Image (cartoon, rainbow, N blue to C red):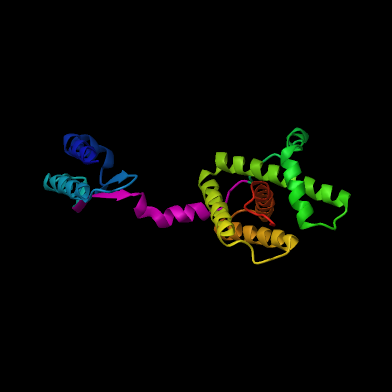
Amino acid sequence: MKQKATSDLPKLIKNSKIISGILQDLKARRWILMCPFLDDKDVIRHVRVKGQDILAANLSFVTRDFEALVHSQEDFSVEIATLKRQSLGPKLAYEPPSDAAIAEKSGEFADKLEAKLRHAYPDMQENTLREKKELYVRGFLRRENAISALRRSYPALWEQLINSIGAEETRLSLFGSTETQPAFRLRESLGRIEQSLGRDLPSMPSSLITDLSVGTLSDWLIRCPLDFD
């Protein structure tokens, strides 16, 4: 990073006639070296010294309080957070699960899901239980499609989503549910996921939050962060 300032700042002097012709009456007050991180304070000192050399050259296109500075990503943490909270913009498009994708999940995946649901709803009729299982399978696949679409189109929001889901899963693994009845645990967990995503990703449509929440609950049922033993 020091080398960047050493090589670039003298170009202001070397090319002063060209730059002056381009800027005309405009004057520069700052030259800023942007870097992803800053773990060496000596870089700041070095850049500021090089900036003083530019000031001493009395260039026509720099102000008398000209400075050379260094900024890193940390200097824009508020702006980065704001951008992450901004609207998705155009509606996020993601495909509903295909019949082939649903059929692919009809084996061990669906069997594990059905076993968990039987435990949660021991008195539920067979037809109703199968319908609920299919809804969870569809929810899981919709969630996977939505996550893939977010990752492609809105990587910053995708990162927030993964962090939010991961934090809620960690909480569940460490502390469990406050409910004792399996059916109530499902309802509580779904509510907590929706609240967490709604809080961390306020710009997301409620329909997307629902798809992500139901799909995450299905994922937890399969992978066992949410268990009824």
Q: Residue furthest front?
A: 229
Residue occupying the point 74% across, 51% down: 116
Give the x, y percent position of residue 54.
16, 45
**Residue 4 visible in the displayed image:** yes
Nearer-the-camera pick, 89 or 61? 89
Would residue 96 be seen by someone viewing this image from the given angle? no
| Residue for point 20% across, 46% down | 47
Range covered by the magenta-colored residues: 65-90
Q: Is residue 58 left or right of residue 118?
A: left
Question: In this view, which residue lies farthest toward the left?
Answer: 56
| Image coordinates for residue 20, horizontal then vertical, percent | 22, 40
Instruction: Please state if 74 lies on the left or on the right of 17 as rendered.
Output: right
Q: Name the spot of residue 2 as percent of width and height, x first.
A: 21, 41
Q: Which residue is more in the foreground, 189 or 92?
A: 189
Left or right of residue 77, residue 162 in this image = right
Is 35 included in the stretch rendered in magenta? no
Asked if the stretch drawn in magenta spans residue 83, the answer is yes
Residue depicted at 58% across the width and 54% down the height: 169
